[in-house]
């Protein structure tokens, strides 16, 4: 794994945006794997800025998102469909039919088949949960290969409750690309920022690969780049 530490979150995200921009520039019809959450927001801001400046063209780009809550309407502002519209798709010239976010109306097999039919993901953007999850692959006794519906752990429900009016409103289930779907991406970039992520980053990088720290599987990926700020790298010394 490549591991790079930046002075702050903004710079770590800018480095991730550079890698995605380079992918789009070198292969205009590339397939992006996209992530939601607070961490990647500055990544999307940069991509939008470079589109508006005329540096990037999304007209042939296709995208597949990692995950979505189950039981939330696409129009709900807290859905990941809405997140992607608001933070990226509405601001660039990506063709709506070329964007894909999973939902409970499709099976995991159908979603994985559509990724493969498109040619596979060229570059997958990831965040990491405090519990080491990637997508909604929560700590478990075994890795789940394909896209699947999963129960969220209490740690994830607590972490996501900051967006909802009350903890009771946080969905208990999600559909997520599996570990295999993620590992099939030709390149993976993971961004982690803030001291809350320091322990997960340490375990991902330094401990043996285990489904109890799902991100640790990335140690086995042949082209994985980890971009962190100093706070998230604080246990690595
Ligand atoms: P966050 O979520 O970016 O909102 O911290 C990351 C994740 O849970 O994967």
Image (spheres, rainbow, N blue to C red):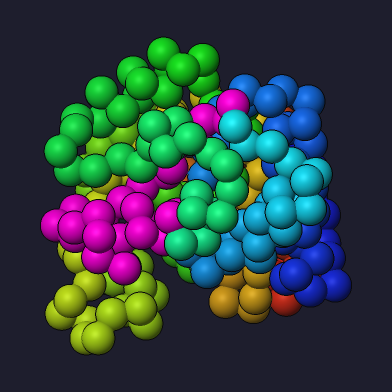
Q: In the rendering, at what x and y percent does residue 70 appear?
A: 19, 53
Q: Going by the image, does 132 lie left or right of 45?
A: left
Q: Depth check: 75 or 162 in front?
A: 75
Q: Does the magenta stretch include residue 74?
A: yes
Quarter location, residue 109: top left
Q: Please say if 69 is above or below 103.
A: below
Q: Please say if 62 is above or below 54.
A: above
Q: What residue lies at 25% left-to-right and 60% top-to-bottom? A: 75
Q: In the rendering, at what x and y percent does residue 69 appear?
A: 26, 56
Q: What residue lies at 48% left-to-right and 35% top-to-bottom? A: 95
Point out the residue furthest to the bottom here.
166
Quadrant including the N terminus: top right
Q: Going by the image, does 155 lie left or right of 217?
A: left
Q: Going by the image, does 91 lie left or right of 95?
A: right
State which region is magenta: 60-85
Q: What residue lies at 15% left-to-right and 38% top-to-bottom? A: 105
- The image shows a total of numbered marks equal to 0
Q: Please say if 159 is above or below 129.
A: below
Quarter location, residue 59: top right
Can residue 37 be seen from the camera position used here?
A: yes
Q: Depth check: 226 or 87 in front?
A: 87
Q: In the rendering, at what x and y percent does residue 116 appear?
A: 43, 16
Q: Please say if 117 is above or below 88.
A: above
Q: In the rendering, at what x and y percent does residue 101 appear?
A: 36, 42
Q: Does the magenta stretch include residue 127?
A: no
Q: What residue lies at 51% left-to-right and 15% top-to-bottom? A: 119
Quadrant including the C terminus: bottom right
Can residue 127 be seen from the camera position used here?
A: no
């Amino acid at each position: 794994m490549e591991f790079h530490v930046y002075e702050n979150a903004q710079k770590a995200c800018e480095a991730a945006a550079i890698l995605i921009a380079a992918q789009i520039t070198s292969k205009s019809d590339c397939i992006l794997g996209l992530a939601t959450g607070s961490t990647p927001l500055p990544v999307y801001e940069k991509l939008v800025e470079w589109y508006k400046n005329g540096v990037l063209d999304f007209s042939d780009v296709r995208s597949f998102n990692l995950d979505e809550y189950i039981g939330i309407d696409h129009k709900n502002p807290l859905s990941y469909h809405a997140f992607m519209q608001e933070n990226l798709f509405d601001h660039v010239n990506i063709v709506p039919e070329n964007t894909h976010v999973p939902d409970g109306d499709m099976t995991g097999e159908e979603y994985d088949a559509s990724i493969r039919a498109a040619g596979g993901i060229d570059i997958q953007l990831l965040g990491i949960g405090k519990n080491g999850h990637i997508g909604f692959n929560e700590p478990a006794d075994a890795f789940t290969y394909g896209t699947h519906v999963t129960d969220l752990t209490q740690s994830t429900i607590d972490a996501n409750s900051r967006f909802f009016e009350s903890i009771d409103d946080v969905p208990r289930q999600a559909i997520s690309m599996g570990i295999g779907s993620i590992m099939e991406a030709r390149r993976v970039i993971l961004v982690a920022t803030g001291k809350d992520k320091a322990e997960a980053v340490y375990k991902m990088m330094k401990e043996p690969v285990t489904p109890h720290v799902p991100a640790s599987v990335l140690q086995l990926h042949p082209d994985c780049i980890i971009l962190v700020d100093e706070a998230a790298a604080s246990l690595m010394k």
